[in-house]
Image (tube, coloured by chain):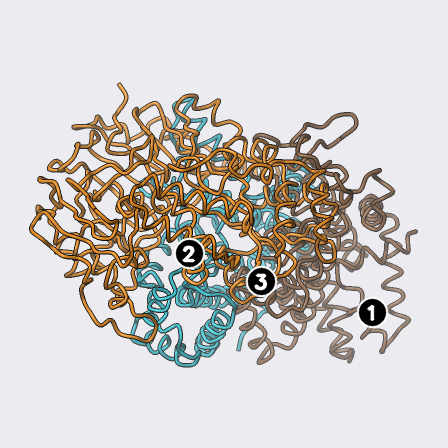
Amino acid sequence: MRGATQTKWLVAATAIALAATACSTSSKSSDDKAASGGGSIAVQLGEPQKGLIPQDTAESEGNQVLYAVFAGLVDYDRKTNAPRLQVAESIDTQDSKLWTIKLKDGYTFHNGEKVTAQSFVDAWNWGANQDNAAEGMPFFNKIEGSDELAPGKDKKPTAKELKGLKVVDDKTFTVSLTAPFSQFKTMLGYSAFYPLPKAFFNDPKAFGENPIGDGPFQMDGAWEHNKQIKIKRYDNYGGTKAKLQNVTFKIYDNLDTAYNDLRADNIQATNKLPISAMSSVAGEFGDRYINKPESGVGYIGFPIAYNPAYQKPEIRKAISMAIDRDAITKTIFAGTRVPASDFISPLINGYRKDACGDACKYDPAKAKDLFTQAGGLPNNTLELGYNADGGHKEWIEAVGNQLKKNLGIEVTFKPFEKFGKILDALQAKQYQGGFRMAWQMDYPSIENYLRPIFSKVAIDSGSNYGGYVNDQFESLLTQADSAKTEDEGIKLYQQADDVLIKDMPYIPVYTYQASAAYTKKIKNFDTDAQSRYNLAEVEMAG
Amino acid sequence: MSDTITKDASAPAGDNSPKATPAKKEKPERVASLWSDAVRDLRRNPLFIIGGVLVLALIVISIVPGWFTDGSPFANGACDLSHSLERPSAEHWFGYDVQGCDIYTRTVWGARNSIIVGILTTTTVTVVGALLGLWAGWKGGVIDSILSRITEIFFSIPTLLGGMLIMSMLPFAGNAYSVSLVMAVLGWPQIFRIMRASVLSNKNNDYVMAARALGAGAGRITFRHILPNAIAPVIVVAAISLGVFIGAEAALSYLGIGVQPPQISWGLMISDAQVRFLAAPHVLLFPAAVLSVTVLAFIMLGDAVRDALDPKLR
Amino acid sequence: MGRYVIRRLIQAIPVLIGATFLIYAIVFFLPGDPVQALAGEKRADPIVAEMIRQKYHLNDPFIVQYWDYISGVFRGDLGSSLQGRSVSEMLGEAFPYTVNLALVAFVIEAVVGVAAGVMAALRKGKFLDQLILISTLLVISIPVFVTGFILQLVLGVQLKNDYGIDFFSVSFNEDDGIRAYLLPAFVLASLSLAYVARLTRTSLMETMRADYVRTAVAKGLKRRRVIVRHALRNALIPIVTFLGADLGGLMGGAVITEKIFNMHGIGGLIAQAVYQKQGTIIVGVVTLLVLIYLVTTLLVDMLYAVLDPRIRYE
């Protein structure tokens, strides 16, 4: 009796187990479909935050898609990061204030509409109008008339068009800036400056789900939220045509899963690797693992505007010198970050290796001396804040352990759910401690590493979260903006950088490395300074 | 020694005070006999002895971690990145974690927070949940409806949201007590439902009818007759939950509610180790093993206490 | 019975309205700026942020916002997210995955859990009993993230790469039908499985000692019939209670499982909404969960009467 009962249960259990393996061998992977034309692949993506409108997209995931679907006036050379004309035939200026932009022939939107000067002007006018609340609005600040379209809170725009934009003919338009800005051309590769077809203005919301661009790929059906975005080659593309026929952006919310899918060749490339893969990816993917400089810089900042404890540059310098950047980047990040020795990313024209000098070199003895001489910190305690959602806990703890050991202070940690919460706390002047932060460039210019993070205007509208103000820095920036040549400008920006190095408003800790990997199925894969896939150049291998 | 153990053992079961106090008012001598029966039972039960010794050992480690390690994990230079993820060795039995801290030292010093979280949360949840469940199940009607509907709302509030809310109202946060409070506030409905069900199925039993016929008061019937019969599933759930609470504490540290580094807890150690599990399994396995042993000890105690209290075994 | 059900359904109305009000208030009064939460690490441009706030009426007083929301709900409009997506659309996308996942997990939990518990109870102390105990300890102390990840690596990657068996896909693939749910559901169910197995074991052991079971055995009934018809039926009450309360938990609390297997269900949606302080999404999801809990507890309460005829509702 008892035996019979047991057997029944056992049979049931085995049946379940068998059901789980029975049909296993019959199913075959379906993504192997012989490539018609140039083949199809899938790549990793995170869910974009907003509708896919170039002027309203300020985050990396949406940008990744827009980069494939749109072509801007300029693109950037993947080696030098210098701007390279794309849709523009020429971009000229005499005084860095009035710019004349001529377009190439042959670019069309995916619905057949020609890309004209008006396509750009209309798009920019839309982006600059505050009623549209587009994320890219601040990028039009420099254009004359932007204050009429974005007069501020509780005010209505008094114009519909930027008076600084003039269409000369179908292929030419001019841009007049409020003040000279030598880096304007470099800015133009940013997504906010992409053109828009007329169809956009009928229904921007619908456009965001299924954008019509002028790039090498076109949408292949609407965005399937949280699942995938499919694109296919646009055969009438005005530039160098894409090789692949189809690309699927598969949407993940966990990098570990994406990495396992890459290992199983269910997707062919990822531009982000999980921490769990760092130690093994080089062995597993060999030369299909890409580890090269990327545009981001990681800092530790302090609320110097309202916490007097951190107002002495010597204190910040001492903290900087007590951090063993080498040990942290090697052990915690397994070489996927590199010690920072400048406020500028190594990718950028104007970067100087070791510009930071002794202030960024690990020297515990000197750090301790400097720290004591400057009077140390109140209660001999330092608090370090970080956002718990971004994998920052380990390195912040490592920094804390080093500071504790080298400066003889107590270090406590404060996690925030999201980086936004750190900003809320800083804005309310509630949070007194140090905090991590990072800067990802918008466009590859040395200026983009200075003004948005350290200038006075950036306190309210940019990323100057510490509230640093230095008049010399401000005036150097203004001088650099109106420099006659690019090189002259860069020299002046470097002088501004030197002011930062002297003051250490933030402590540069590391610069990011792009870590991407791809499978044997594809070749010619690469990523750019913002870790965007070069999908237009990727080919199927063999 | 056995006295200490009895006290500790009855704590997680949560049936100590509720049963003893109200019953005492009526007929104290009967309570003594129920308890002396139970204690006599327990002393003879090997499960109870092993579980009790383990729990006692854990409590001693929590109180005086310094007896079990030479170093302190809070000392200057206790962690050195040059030792990051080193494997276990003769000198360092558990190896090093990613920060280059000795895992054995941290496990020993982390016991206190974890044991506090585990015992405090489990006790609160069990006492509150069981008492309310007893009340709702016994009274029925309006009281049952109101309490049941409240639990449904509590169940539906996402832990994250509830945690943030409670945290924003707390004057203190980031330690073993704040996290226990949050988990207790969000955790009691489960025990409530189980206790209520247990009472419902027991209150129609013959012995309850008999007691009622004999003129026993409501308090006496619930605590003397129904509770001992209905408590078994609650003990089972409580013993498992104790371990779950210890582990879940780490998830709440992310919100600033749980124990914060440089403080140590097993939950944090386990959670920090999980991303590098493949490269360095030892960082996860040692604290996980200690947590397992702790849960095992409480499951053994729970089983023993349940057997001791079950009148059907008399 | 019929009147009881009607009364319970009427009670649901104030509970639902109260819950939406409560949740809306919690989200409203929690500190934090939802517009900045969307902007990531760069500060939202003050003008753009203000325009978004105006567009979604975030500057209005609480009671006005709540009124707008609730009157929208009565018109069948659950509002929209701050990214301009309709909440009902988002729920409609996420909910089917969650329901399927929760149901498969529920079946695994109920069937395997009860079966394992029955076997453990019948052969106390034997191999299977010990195995269940050890598995329980494992699922408590090893985070779901790790077990899920390892299963995914072994069954999803290695089985395909090394043996050519492409049965379990790494990330969830809807086209695979129910097969796609097996692995995630197993991972999701594992902890509850431990509870169910241990509850069943204890509960069955207790009822096996009850008078009516002894009577049944004495009457000469077959052992299997005694176990299934008499002992197990009664022992099921706490288990059914646990399972009922757990069903909602499986739906709202599958955050990690959903993440591991790249399913975009309710768990992830709610976690993200809480982090971003998006009231409309949170209230939408939580209201749905309250509804689910209301229905499951009603079903469970009715099941009690089926399992134990002595329990009656008037």
Q: Secondary structure at mark 2?
A: helix
SS for callout 3: helix
Is C79 displayed left or right of B39 in the figure?
A: left
The amino acid at mark 2 is Leu
Question: Which of label 3 and label 1 is nearer to you?
Answer: 3
Characterize the local packing of mark 1: few (<14), some (14-19) or many (20 or more) Cα atoms within 10 angstroms: some
Q: Which chain is orange?
A: A
Q: Are marks 2 and 3 on the same chain?
A: no
Circle 3 residue: B163
Q: Which residue is mark 2?
A: C269
**For the N terminus of chain A, which image quadrant?**
top right
Q: Chain of mark 1?
A: B
- Comparing B31 with A188, the one in front is A188
Please tell me which of labels 3 and 1 falls first in the chain: 1
**Where's residue A164, x and y in %?**
20, 59
* Label 2 neighbour load within 10 Å: few <14, some 14-19, many 20+: some
User: What label does residue B20 carry, if any?
Assistant: 1
Q: Position of residue B213 (x, y in %)?
A: 74, 78
Q: Quadrant of residue B168?
A: bottom right
Position of A541 with respect to B196 (left or right) is left
Q: Residue at x 58, y 65 (%)?
A: A430
Name the residue furthest right: B1
**Height in image: B82 above or below A444?**
above
Q: Residue at x 47, y 24 (%)?
A: A282
Residue type beneath disc 3: Gly
Q: Which chain is cyan?
A: C
Q: Chain of mark 2?
A: C
